[in-house]
Image (cartoon, rainbow, N blue to C red):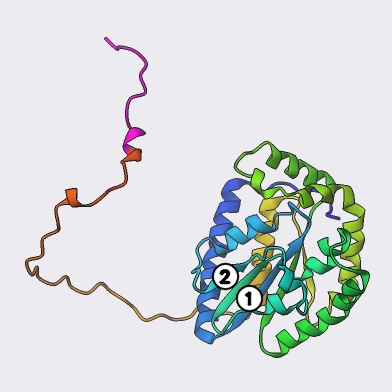
Amino acid sequence: MAGKKKARIPRELYERELLRLQAELVKLQEWVRHEGARLVVVFEGRDAAGKGSTIKRVTEHLNPRVVRIAALPSPTERERTQWYFQRYIEHLPAAGEIVLFDRSWYNRAGVERVMGFCTPEEHRRFLQQCPIFERLLIDDGILLRKYWFSVSLDEQERRFSARIDDPMRRWKLSTIDLRSVTHWEDYSRAKDDMFVHTDTAESPWHVVESEEKRRGRLNMIADLLASVPYHEVSRQAVSLPPRPEPTGYFRPDRRLQTYVPDHAATLLRPTGGGNHG
């Protein structure tokens, strides 16, 4: 469970530090690409703990061809017959790539166990195999970072209620999310059991206190940057080439093409208010 909620970071200070950290993330991205490194970041935690919003801030200024988000849907009937880790393997990065798992193979240790989507034997096998699986990734050179976002029951309920009342965020709520409130202690026990088996010296969990989202985002990004031995990659200076002389090209008549309506212009029109003498 998350600790006592700390003072909120002032917006101006938060935005200034976030921008600085995002600039460092760009340097990290270029280092990964230049060195051919492979970085995997696992985002796990309570529902509404701030994983998704943190991922958005991490990727905001990054190249989607280098940094990918893996947010897998429920497994298909065929995938349910595969080795459990199999469908996650195809999303692992190649050289020069970063993959952010918005939930990961740890679904089996959390929601699948609590909601009965796996058998006790499947859960036991997962806890046994997971440290071995992660050791194989690390031995092959993958940089693996695991973050658990922690939030209190009261704060989770407050965020759920805010989503219910907000049509722009209501889509984030699923029946499984809402049921998690009634299974709080079950999820706590599942998380504790998961940590016992998978919080290892070579692949540790890093807990992000996310009771205050701004603080949690800054702390997580700063920790990620500190954990990777990246450095700024020097890039060759570039400049625009001189524009060549015209060769007689004429643009086709604009009436031959279909343009989108100028919706923006409607925002500039007077909204009424009567005559003004």
Q: Position of residue 44 (x, y in %)?
A: 75, 64
In this view, the residue farthest toward the top is 277
Residue 122 lies left or right of residue 158; in this view the side is right
**Residue type, mark 2 in image:** Arg
> Which quarter of the rendered picture does the N terminus lie within?
bottom right
Q: CA distance from mark 1 to mark 2?
A: 9 Å
The verdict on residue 77 being magenta is no
In the image, 133 versus 88, the foreground residue is 88
Residue at 9% over, 70% down: 245
Residue 91 is marked as 1
For discs 1 and 2, the disc positioned in front in the rendered view: 1
Q: Is residue 68 above or below residue 170?
A: below
Residue 178 is left or right of residue 68, and the answer is right
Asked if marks 1 and 2 touch (Cβ < 8 Å), the reply is yes
Amino acid type, residue under disc 1 in the picture? His
Give how far across and how far down residue 185 sits, in percent.
92, 54
Residue numbers of the magenta segment: 265-277
Q: Is residue 98 visible?
A: yes
Q: Please, what secondary structure does the residue beneath circle 1 have?
A: loop
Q: Is residue 150 above or below residue 12?
A: below
- Give the x, y percent position of residue 181: 84, 47
Q: Residues within 10 Å of mark 1 (few under 14, many from 20)?
A: some
Residue 267 within the magenta-colored segment of the rendering: yes
Q: Position of residue 42 (x, y in %)?
A: 70, 70
Residue name at image x 66 percent, y 75 percent: 40
**Label drawn at residue 68:** 2
Q: Main secondary structure of the magenta part?
A: loop
The residue at the point 30 percent across, 11 percent down is: 275
Which residue is rendered at x = 71% and y = 47% of the image?
A: 173
